[in-house]
Amino acid sequence: MMKQALVVRSDVKMSRGKLAVQCSHASYSAASAAKRPALQQWAKDGQKKVVLKAKDIALLMQLRDACIRLRLPHALISDAGMTELSPGTITCLGIGPADEAAVNKVTGSLPLLK
């Protein structure tokens, strides 16, 4: 089973709409970094996604580093600063689509965003 995780910084205050847009950027950008067979299997599996939270930028960067070590497709999203946030504010990290077990190695201890 393939999965994608979207990890949002909980220390950055955003409206629900802004958060949805940042997650959309992360989903698209991380999927664009995946290889075609992974994308095809993910689509076949129903494009499973989970939205999680990271307490701060330091944790988000640790997760990004783990993605690099495990060679998982990922995308770190920084805001353009046109609306609510300052330019360059890192908001979230998209991970995958990749094998669910591999994604869980990076994100398994994170809480769901509620």
Image (cartoon, helix red, strand yellow):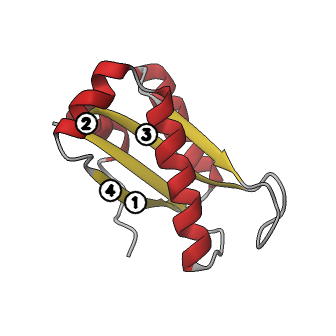
Closer mark to the observer between disc 2 and disc 1: 2
How far is the residue under mark 4 from the one under mark 3?
10 Å
Determine the residue positioned at 49% across, 37% down: 30
Q: Is residue 10 visible?
A: no
Residue 73 place in picture, x, y as percent: 45, 28
Q: What residue type is labelled 1?
A: Leu
Q: Calculate the distance from the C-alpha at mark 4 to the C-alpha at mark 2.
A: 13 Å
The residue indicated by pointer 1 is 52
The residue singled out by tag 2 in the image is 42
Q: Disc 4 vs disc 1: which is toward the camera?
A: 4
- Picture quarter with the C terminus: bottom left
Question: Could you tell me how far apart the alpha carbons at marks 1 and 3 are, in whole angstroms?
Answer: 11 Å
- The span from disc 2 to disc 1 (Cα, nearest Å) is 19 Å
Residue type, label 2? Trp
Residue at point 30%, 25% (across, down): 38
Q: In this view, does 73 lie above or below 62?
A: above
Amino acid marked by disc 4: Val
Residue type for callout 3: Ile
Residue at x 27% of width, y 42% of height = 3
| Residue 16 or residue 60, whichever sits in front | 16
Location of residue 78 in the rendering, given as x and y in whole percent from the top left corner = 70, 50
Q: Mark 4 points at which residue?
A: 50
Q: Where is residue 34 in the image (x, y as percent from the top left)?
A: 42, 26
Quadrant placement of the N terminus: top left
- The numbered mark, 3 or 2, whose residue comes first in the sequence reads 2
Q: What element carries label 1?
A: strand
Residue 63 shows in the view: yes
Give the alpha-carbon distance from disc 4 to disc 1, as whole Å. 6 Å
The CA distance from mark 3 to mark 2 is 13 Å
**Label 4 vs label 2, nearer the camera:** 2
Q: Mark 3 points at which residue?
A: 95
Assess disc 3: are there few (<14), some (14-19) or many (≥20) residues with their C-alpha within 10 Å of its C-alpha. many
